[in-house]
Image (tube, helix red, strand yellow):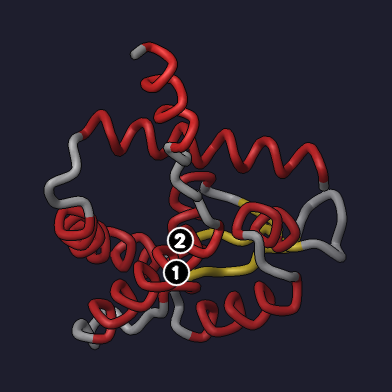
Amino acid sequence: MIFVLEATLHKIKQPEVSGFTIEKTVKLMKLSFSRILMMHPEIDITVDQWIIIQLLSKHKNLSQQQIAELSFKDAPTVTRIIDILVNKDIVRRDADHLDRRKFSILLTDNGIDTYKMVIPILEEFRREAYADIAHEDLIALEETMNKIFQNLSKQN
């Protein structure tokens, strides 16, 4: 009887965890949040612009290179997004005192207001996206995603 049980257990396959599952979820989250932002024309930002605003809110003062690294976007893309945010008076570029070829990027007062307007929208979006998922499961998911990220970072 024990032999039969062991043989049965060997036949049970582990679920296949696919990068595709992660990718499609991330894309759907970005698309869904983008649609929500579009329903708020008074805010007038995209998800990619929001990522930079959020980074600047957290770090206060970053170079364009630091923003590119933290957002996992290439430098030309970051430059275009920052140009748009400067034109919207959400961020400003200040010359670096040590290297005049570099700029420090900071949120303007309007940028801080934009950040404050988006936070409740983002929190509601997350409440809906994470509905019926235990807090412990979300923590475990984040820890797992961070571990995958660390594993892949070692290779690159």
Q: Please give the residue where the numbered disc 2 appears in the rendered image.
A: 21
- Left or right: 17, with 45 as reference point: right
Quarter where residue 43 is shown: bottom left
Determine contact: label 1, label 2, CB under 8 Å: yes
- Left or right: 129, with 44 as reference point: left
Amino acid found under the numbered disc labelled 1:
Lys
Q: Please give the residue where the numbered disc 1 appears in the rendered image.
A: 24
Amino acid found under the numbered disc labelled 2:
Thr
Report helix, strand or loop for mark 2.
Answer: helix
Q: Nearer the viewer, residue 13 or 136?
A: 13
* Mark 1–mark 2 distance (CA, rounded to whole Å): 5 Å
In the image, which disc is placed on residue 87?
none
- Name which residue lies at 55% across and 58% down: 19
x%, y% of residue 149? 62, 42
x%, y% of residue 84? 54, 84
x%, y% of residue 138? 30, 38
- Left or right: 65, with 4 as reference point: right
